[in-house]
Amino acid sequence: MKRSSVLDKQSVKRHKRKGSLPSKKFFGQLGFGLIKIFLFFLGLGALSLAFIAGYQFLSSSSYFRLHNIVVAGVNDDFREELIKISGLKEKENLLSIESSTIRRNIERHPWIRSIFLKKEFPHTLYITAEREEAVAIVIRETMSFMNKEGIVFKDVESNECIDFPVVTGLSKGGEKNTAKLKGAASLLNAIHLCESPFLIKHLSEIHVEEAGTFIVYFKKLPFKVLFGRNDFERKIGSLIDIINHLQNTYRLDQAKSIDLNYIDRAVVAFDGRVI
């Protein structure tokens, strides 16, 4: 009976040991860890405040004042216009200038294609501008300039030069115009690459048919040229050969049309007959 009593007491003691409260050492370690975390965030906050205060000081300092604006890619008259619309202020602090805002302001100009900015501390801002290059005028409801990618980027104003080939036949609206304009630009580029001064100089009109085929008219040539919708470089080579042949046989003025939309031949129409 005594042995049984001793075992019972030992069992009770072990049970109490398992459910005992955390020691003072545990609370000390926990408190020290919390203090370290608090000090870390306090230091981080102080560092951030120091950085902000330092930046504010430098961004208002006269040492980084903007004195030189260098604009490349445009002429002097256009340079002044770009600086004006950029939003730059006289003797503005170079650190406080937001490049994205300046870029956005300048790229709103219809004749600007892209802008590159570079700050050179302490006093200089470089602006490199790429101008749009018009290669044709698109005639729809209004007259608009088109670039070499077939993108219409600006309406023609009364004081602007319009000595460009025209693109006609486009509908007033519609998604098909995008593909047709790209095709017209491809044809224009092929003509400029053919190294024929006569064709480049006397290109007058590219007419876009409903089906997307192209008819081209040249000044000082009495006939229209049917180009189809692709393979322009080969067809331009054929056109040059045909023009030379017609000149040599004194029949250039008699031709009414040249249809190049064939793989192995071209069709030349004269007054009342086709060869």
Image (spheres, rainbow, N blue to C red):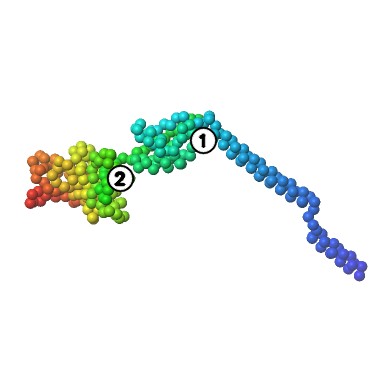
Disc 2 target residue? 155
Residue placed most toward the observer, 32 or 267: 32
Q: Is residue 261 visible?
A: yes
Q: Determine whether the residue tagged by mark 2 lies in a helix, strand or loop.
A: strand
Residue at the image position 18 percent from the left and 51 percent from the top = 262
Sequence-wise, the earlier of marks 1 and 2 is: 1
Q: Is residue 108 left or right of residue 181?
A: right
| Residue 193 appears in view | no
Q: Residues within 10 Å of mark 2 (few under 14, many from 20)?
A: some
On the image, the x and y values in percent for residue 109 come to 37, 41
Name the residue at 43% across, 32% down.
Answer: 69
Disc 1 to disc 2, C-alpha distance: 37 Å
What is the number of the mark on residue 112? Answer: none
Residue 150 lies left or right of residue 120; in this view the side is: left
Residue reaching furthest right?
A: 2
Horizontal relation, residue 136 to residue 37: left or right: left
Q: Amino acid at mark 1?
A: Leu
The residue lying toward the viewer, choosing from 156 and 228, is 156
Q: Position of residue 237 (x, y in %)?
A: 20, 43
The residue at which mark 1 appears reads as: 95
Under mark 2, the amino acid is Asp
